[in-house]
Image (cartoon, helix red, strand yellow):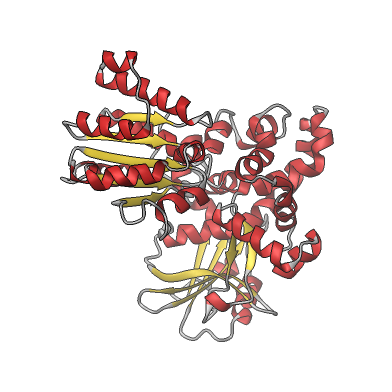
Amino acid sequence: MFYNRTDELAYLDSKFDSAAAELIILWGRRRIGKTYLLREFCKRHNGLFLMATASSGMDNLMDFSQTLADYFQDTRLQIAPLQNWDDFFLYLHEKLTTRTVIVIDEYPYLVETNPGISTILQKHWDLRLLQNSHAMFILNGSAISMMEKETLNYHAPLYGRRTGQWFLENFDPISSAAFFKITGLIEIIKMYAVTSGVPFYCNILSREPDLFSAIENRILRKGEILFEEVDFLLRQEFKTPRSYFPILKTISLGSRKFGEISSKTGYDKSNLTKYLASLEQLKLIRREIPISENRPEKSRRGLYFLNDNLVDFWFQFVFPNKSELESGNNKRIMNEYVVPQFDYYVSRQVEPIIIDLLKRDFFQLGWKFSTIGRDWDKNNEIDIMGITESGQKVIGEIKWTEKPCDRSVYASLTEKNLRIKDGIYLIVSKSGFTSDLLGLASESLHLVDLRKWKVG
């Protein structure tokens, strides 16, 4: 079933409705739903969908020829397939007599087997396709570094030819809830703490009646696709996946600083810098800078976090128990490790989720932020620090505990940042608030009880 992606489809529709030739670059990490999106778009506009494979260049050309023959009902092409890529683009130009969407899915595979394909496309785009208002090309790929190298970077053959680009991202927490048909915000947060809103993960886990069943049967069980997900991702993206595995594990286990990661992995500064840059480029990790930093591009206070919550979950619960799980003891691992530690695990993921909801004004506080994030120094960590478009400062604390928040939480929050003047304090709680703290709620202290919020 196809979910959401209304913004992406609206963007593609606007390009389809333009009166000019279009060359769109759509890219993003694996598992994010690029192919589903483009198949849905082609379905709506009777588009031509061409899927490249890791086979040889000639095999791809033969497959594309067959698809073209079927699409244009060309019996001659079925008998005499195209022999080279110049013929391929020339054939398309001649056949495009009405507005037509042409999707080349997994374009990096085509580049790997035909290193000159981008230059050939550039030539035909400049010579004839650019003047063909019936043409709407979409190049799609998961190999982020190759997509950028071939289509977006300054020295790329197609640089300056693209007419639009879209980096496809995860679903936000609210949109991803549609997979699970859940409405309570606390349950949505728990789900997002495992899936990060990655459509592939959501689709698999939503086949079970609840999140714990999904974890036990779809992540912890040997033979299930998510049981081997981290190994798969690294093998797909890197020639030497073992070089990156220790970094992801170290970050997942709580080492966030560059020096700590270097010490735990044994990598020197040069190699670690290179590996971290590759992981960042693939969106597997992110580097956060304190939001109050005046010169973030030169900051040495950056911390590294895993960007994929399922990868984080895997390192927390699958990797350390791999031998037990290989023996079929997923129920025992679930009951003895996952269930008792799950709330603590979620508490490590909840801050970016709440910040995302605040950006969307989900809690109807009426704040539009010009900047918002986390902040820290040697002495304090602040879960939420933001400045609204009106210049109002907001300082917040998030409590994911079983106890209601009392006045001590507010006192601690005010002590953490004595610099704030005429600002607003915010406390977000999983378990509500004591009566004495509720009595302090005012225009300068906002209290958000997560139990009271639902979607839809």
Identify which residue, 324 or 441, lies in the foreground.
Answer: 324
Q: How many marks do you count on the picture?
A: 0
Query: Going 69% across and 40% down the picture, which residue do you hit?
Result: 231
Position of residue 5 in the picture relative to residue 384 (left or right): left
Q: Quadrant of residue 365?
A: bottom left
Q: Residue 51's x, y, as percent?
A: 43, 30
Q: Residue 64's x, y, as percent?
A: 38, 26
Residue 5 visible in the displayed image: no
Query: Going 32% across and 56% down the picture, which residue do you hit?
Result: 160
Q: Residue 280's x, y, as percent?
A: 58, 57
Q: Quadrant of residue 35?
A: top left
Query: Going 70% across and 43% down the picture, which residue do you hit?
Result: 314
Where is 44 relative to 345, above or below? above
Where is 85 relative to 82, above or below? below
Q: Residue 42's x, y, as percent?
A: 31, 31
Identify which residue, 304 or 234, lies in the foreground.
Answer: 234
Query: Going 59% across and 52% down the picture, which residue do you hit?
Result: 284
Where is 233 relative to 213, above or below? below
Residue 98 visible in the displayed image: yes
Identify which residue, 327 or 143, lies in the foreground.
Answer: 143
Quarter of the figure that contains the C terminus: top left
Quarter of the figure that contains the N terminus: top left
